[in-house]
Image (spheres, rainbow, N blue to C red):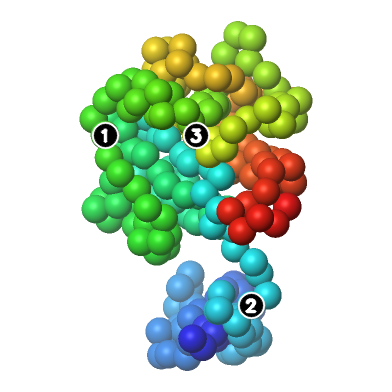
Amino acid sequence: MAGIQYNFYECINPDCELRFPGYESGPRWNRCPRCRANTRLVAKVGTLSRQQSNIKVNKSGKLIALLDNIRSAWNVGSIFRTADGFGIGKIFLCGISPTPENHKLAKTALGAELSVPWEYFTNGVKLTKDLKSQGYALCALEDYPGATPLFQVDVSPIIVPLVLIAGNEVCGIDPEIIAHCDQVISIPMYGKKQSYNVAIAFGIALSFLSYRLNEITPDRSGHS
């Protein structure tokens, strides 16, 4: 599969000089999207496809996501894209969380909704109980009393796969789901706001947990 050619253009209007990217060559990039003046081609960038790159994608399925009542299709789409990057085994969508049929979700997922397996459940509490009975380790990402700061989490006793749970942007995770979790983790805040955007928080937590789990547990091929 061939890579994609990206071009960068610059507006020739001295009062504007907008610099922006375009995909492949085409007449639409001959005009500045801001002031409609003519543009000039200033740079070309070629990107490698995944098949051509040396990036090794982890598809071990050590991590699974459960999104409970996340209302924004943009946030769910962003989480799908992040999940694809870390080789998440599956995403469970619960309650009012939109599914990939939603065009807004697909717009931010950029195809990740096609590569990450997913399943929808109306009731996140029932799903959580079922996963718990199957032996999954459940980890809620929530600013909750007694929550363990993310970078102090000890993943060594965790039996994978681990289910990382994120909840509603305003109300958080259903308290009954939290009651069934093995641990609750939070991300330290140093600014004036009291919480991160749920998609950003999910990415931060996923990055740390994925690294730690891959560092200390063997994958299915037997490699550390």
User: Please, what is the three-letter code of the amino acid marked with disc 1?
Assistant: Phe
Foreground residue among 81 and 196: 81
Q: Position of residue 187 (x, y in %)?
A: 66, 27
For label 2, count other residues whose C-alpha is less than 10 Å away and answer few (under 14), some (14-19) or many (20+): few
Q: CA distance from mark 3 to mark 2?
A: 29 Å
Please state if 112 lies on the left or on the right of 104 as rendered: right
Element type where label 3 sits in the image: strand
Q: Position of residue 182 (x, y in %)?
A: 55, 19
Q: Position of residue 131 (x, y in %)?
A: 40, 29
Foreground residue among 158 and 142: 158
Q: Are marks 1 and 3 in contact (CB under 8 Å)?
A: no
Residue at (43% x, 90% y) in the render: 26
Where does label 2 land, which residue? Answer: 53
Q: Position of residue 15 (x, y in %)?
A: 61, 73
Q: CA distance from mark 1 to mark 3?
A: 15 Å
For label 1, count other residues whose C-alpha is less than 10 Å away and answer few (under 14), some (14-19) or many (20+): some
Mark 2 / mark 1, whichever is N-terminal: 2
Mark 1 / mark 3, whichever is N-terminal: 1
Mark seen at residue 163: 3
Quadrant in the rendering for residue 120: top left
Name above or below for residue 109 compared with residue 205.
below
User: Please, what is the three-letter code of the amino acid marked with disc 2?
Assistant: Ser
User: Please, what is the three-letter code of the amino acid marked with disc 3?
Assistant: Val
Q: Are marks 2 and 1 in contact (CB under 8 Å)?
A: no
| Residue at the extreme top | 145
Where does label 1 land, which residue? Answer: 121
For label 3, count other residues whose C-alpha is less than 10 Å away and answer few (under 14), some (14-19) or many (20+): many
Residue at (36% x, 61% y) in the render: 114
Residue at (56% x, 45% y) in the render: 62
